[in-house]
Image (cartoon, helix red, strand yellow):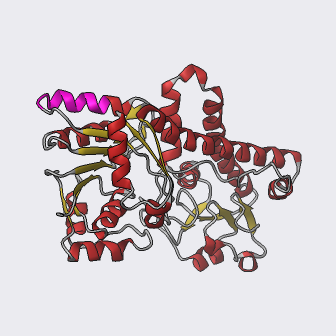
Amino acid sequence: MHPTKICVIGLGQVGLPTAALLASRGNKVLGVDLSPKTVKDTNAGQTNNTEPGLKKLLKSAVKTKKLAASTKPSAADIFIILVPTQATPQKTLDIKPLKKAVTSIAKVLEEGNLVLLQSTVPPQTTKKVDGLIRKIRPDLKSYYLAYCPERVLPGRTIKELTENNRIIGGLTTVSTKKAAGFYKTFVTGKIELTDAPTAELCKLAENAFRNVNIAFANELSMICDAAGGNAWEVIRLANTHPRVKILTPGPGVGGRCLAANTEFLKAAASEKTPLIKASRQVNEEKTRWVTEKIRQTATNRKNPVIGCLGITYKADVSGTSGSPAMKVIDALRQKKTGKIIVCDPHATRTGNTKLLPLQKVLSKSNIIAILVAHKEFKNIRKKIRGKEILDFCGALE
């Protein structure tokens, strides 16, 4: 039997690991990305993606000629779409990358092909994707389309691509079964079958649930501060209750997914989402609150030097997309709040932010603001005695 030809559209945080993993299973994979640099790096077996195990997997897949990359798709048996979809700063929905991806593959689709949409999307998008394909290719009589959201955690992507449970929602029952048959070739987790709209809503519900729970933790931390209580102790003790599990507060909520998913779910029925809207507002307020806390502390120093620890969107990952820590740092700079120096041992993209070694930041600062609970920050208490410590994420608890 000839190897299955798979075309993965989008070689980003999840797309590249997916392509490399599928290639390692003997499939013939073409990874497609609009970035010439990404394509060039992939074809050389190189990547800046720090996902554990990826570089080795990628190098092997390229060396064995099971994986190649291009800026344009070509004929395949299966197409997997993993391009970014997000909410704009104006909180409108941006699915232009998805439309471009669908348009590009529609031109090379053949009878009997399977198209798998894994990008996070608003409800009813899968049906719209089918409409777009039909419009571009009215000659195409039969192909299969299903929505199969990814659920991986950065830092565990390779492992979770195979081990996580999967939800598969086809546009038709036959499409659902076709998609399930493919995922069973490499997924060891349980595969749940449903329809496309339900699968779309499930992915959004998962992230909205986390967003709401993070908002509660963030709001509680501000209440504890106002009431003179220790937020970390309150949460620890409350969580001894058998039916309570409060999350850890932070400087807001980070990452592209949670914010975008909240907006996608609101778009489905805006008038029915007061809780979801409120959670977004609380998380944004927490970022402003953290900024003001640091500013208030700085006013008590003649020459404040603020050491900000962490700029990524969550602990022990390299991504900074949607990072509340970055928003805090930017706001402090805009308001000219003393001298700002920054350390992050994980970040790979820093924009205009210069990163310094941890020891240098600790020695030069008189105010330490811990914004991300990286493991490297857990044992610094002895090194910062005599300094003002603001731990906004429980790194020292």
Q: Position of residue 310 (x, y in %)?
A: 57, 64
Considering depth in this image, is 129 or 215 the residue closer to the camera?
Answer: 129
- Asked if residue 126 is among those painted magenta in the image, a careful observer would answer no
From the image, which quarter does the C terminus lie in?
bottom right
**In the picture shown, does residue 287 fall above or below 365?**
above
Indicate the position of residue 380 as horizontal and vertical percent values.
Answer: 70, 76
Count of numbered badges drawn on the protein: 0
- Whether residue 121 is situated above or below residue 268 in the rendered picture: below
Tell me what residue is drawn at x 74 percent, y 56 percent. Answer: 297
Residue 269 located left or right of residue 171: right
- Describe residue 121's horizontal placement relative to residue 116 as left or right: right
Residue located at (65% from left, 72% from top): 377
Where 230 falls versus 316 (above or below)?
A: above
**Would you identify the image quadrant in which residue 230 lies?**
bottom right
| In this rendering, position of residue 191 left or right of residue 362 | left
Quadrant (top left, top right, bottom left, bottom right) of the N terminus: bottom left
Q: Nearer the viewer, residue 146 or 379?
A: 146
User: Which one is in front, 358 or 80?
Assistant: 80
Residue 304 can be seen in this image:
no
Vertical arrangement, residue 62 with respect to residue 183, above or below: below
Find residue 255 and report its horizontal and vertical position in percent.
51, 51
Q: Residue furthest top?
A: 271
- Residue 352, by quadrant, is bottom left
Along the horizontal axis of the image, is 239 left or right of 306? right
Q: Which residues are magenta?
A: 128-139
Residue at horizontal 84 percent and vertical 45 percent from the top = 226
**Where is residue 291 shown, x and y percent of the image?**
65, 50
Magenta residues: mostly which secondary structure?
helix
**Residue occupying image coordinates x 22% and y 52%:** 34
Q: Residue furthest right?
A: 228
